[in-house]
Image (tube, rainbow, N blue to C red):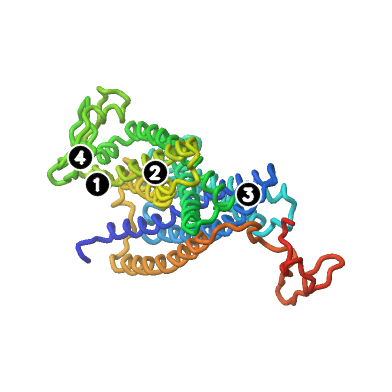
Amino acid sequence: MFGIDALTLARGQFAFTVGFHIVFPAFSIGLAAYLAVLEGLWLKTGRQVYLDLWRYWVKIFSIGFAMGVVSGVVMSYEFGTNWSVFARKAGPVLGPMLAYEVLTAFFLEAGFLGVMLFGMNRVGRGLHFLATCLVSVGTLISMSWILASNSWMQTPRGYTIDRATGRFLPADWWAIIFNPSFPYRLVHMGLAAFLCVAFVVGAVGAYHLLRDRKLARRPSDAVRTMFSMAMWMAAIVAPLQILAGDTQGLNTLQYQPAKIAALEGDWQTRDHAPEILFGIPNMKQERTDYKIELPLAGSLILTHSLSGRVPGLLQFKPQDRPYSPLIFFTFRIMVGLGMLMALLGALSLLLRWRGTFYSNPWLHRFALAMAPSGFIALLCGWITTEVGRQPYTVYGLLRTSESVSPIALPGIATSFAAFVVVYFVVFGAGLVFILRMMAHEPELGESGPNPREPIRTSGIHPGPAQGPGERPLDKHPGGALPHPAE
């Protein structure tokens, strides 16, 4: 089939499904935290604008959360169908951690999600705020367990190997969970999730600021507030993310030097190494063509010393080398977008100081163009991490070629084709729906569940809703029922 074997197609299928899935949890993690902040500010200040923004974004959150759950279910089946050998050998270590993720995180999210979405007018303010915070905490705990599992695959520790079966058996759960790469990747991923949402929220605010400017009308407090909060997040978190990425790079150099050599495009191990800004790694000729180098910068960035030693791919056997041409470019796209994020944050601070933050159209266009930047950087970072781990599923111990199920190519091709069609139809429709919701500006008194509306229980026809001493058809002055905030 076009020269593709079953292993390559199985890897492509898993990459496709994970690539779709990873976007939605990152969005849920960042947006859940944003909702908790908004509700906390509303309770503290009593300002209606924070409640309006909460109601505006919670509807978008519910759709994104649902798509994240659905997209994640497929991967569990893929472990059994395409990667059964990996599941059998690594299952004793990874299985319990994934179970802990469900027990400690997903149950927490699912248990309080209903209160968060529909309980604003049915429980007390304090209890509802607690539910929102617990949903946010649940998403963070979920991320922690998933990253602990994946980080163990990158830097395995705390295991023994059953020589008879080749299975990894847990020996020290503390070492397994808190493996050498886990803390760095946890911080890096958490900040990435917050930046993804910050630039989406900022882009929505920028879009409405530009439209209001075109219509010659004053932007609402909600639009101004969401744009301001997003740019504060960009100004603060983007530089922190650059620092977090640097520390993760030092950790990767220590534990996965082949990955560093591949993403840098370095073939020779040397001191005083330059940084290759651009080039095309050539795996057959074992060199990087069309190089544009910055002298000494490679050693300085990777080792924080001008004379530091940087590994080259030639020190590793050809069968142990990651595919450099792919991660060379994904790494640079991720870093380039990170620099643009920091630049946008710095520009927003400058224009705040000059007093043109809400009136400068170039800032708003810049923010609007950066809407997908967090997700693109996230996907490029994930590709760099996972492809850089190749040719292993468990780094240095279990090869990817030894992890695949004995399944024929037509079976993988059929399911892959079905996934592509279904994913683009279902998630494409969900994305269009979310974008349409974002196209509507947050309104004063943003709609939420109305306590006066009757609730239909199965088999029961609801009666008309009315308050004490009020006739069923009584109207609020102006012809509309009063908003719950009134």
Image: 234 above or below 379:
above
Residue drawn at x 48%, y 60% is 73
Q: CA distance from mark 1 to mark 4?
A: 13 Å
Q: Nearer the viewer, residue 50 or 394?
A: 50
Say which residue label 1 marks.
323
Position of residue 221 measured from the top left corner of the image (x, y, whole percent): 59, 50
Image: 456 above or below 225:
below
The answer to which of marks 2 and 3 sits earlier in the sequence is: 3
The answer to which of marks 1 and 4 sits earlier in the sequence is: 4
Say which residue label 4 marks.
317
Position of residue 430 measured from the top left corner of the image (x, y, whole percent): 48, 64
For the residues bearing labels 2 and 4, Cβ distance under 8 angstroms: no
Q: Is residue 92 visible?
A: no
Q: CA distance from mark 3 to mark 1?
A: 48 Å
Position of residue 63 measured from the top left corner of the image (x, y, whole percent): 53, 61
Q: CA distance from mark 2 to mark 1?
A: 18 Å
Q: CA distance from mark 2 to mark 4?
A: 21 Å
Nearer to us: label 1 or label 4? 1
Nearer to us: label 2 or label 3? 3
Nearer to us: label 4 or label 3? 3
Q: CA distance from mark 4 to mark 3?
A: 57 Å
Q: Residues within 10 Å of mark 4 (few under 14, many from 20)?
A: few
The answer to which of marks 2 and 4 sits earlier in the sequence is: 2
Q: Residues within 10 Å of mark 3 (few under 14, many from 20)?
A: many
Q: Amino acid at mark 3?
A: Tyr
Q: Nearer the viewer, residue 102 or 127?
A: 127
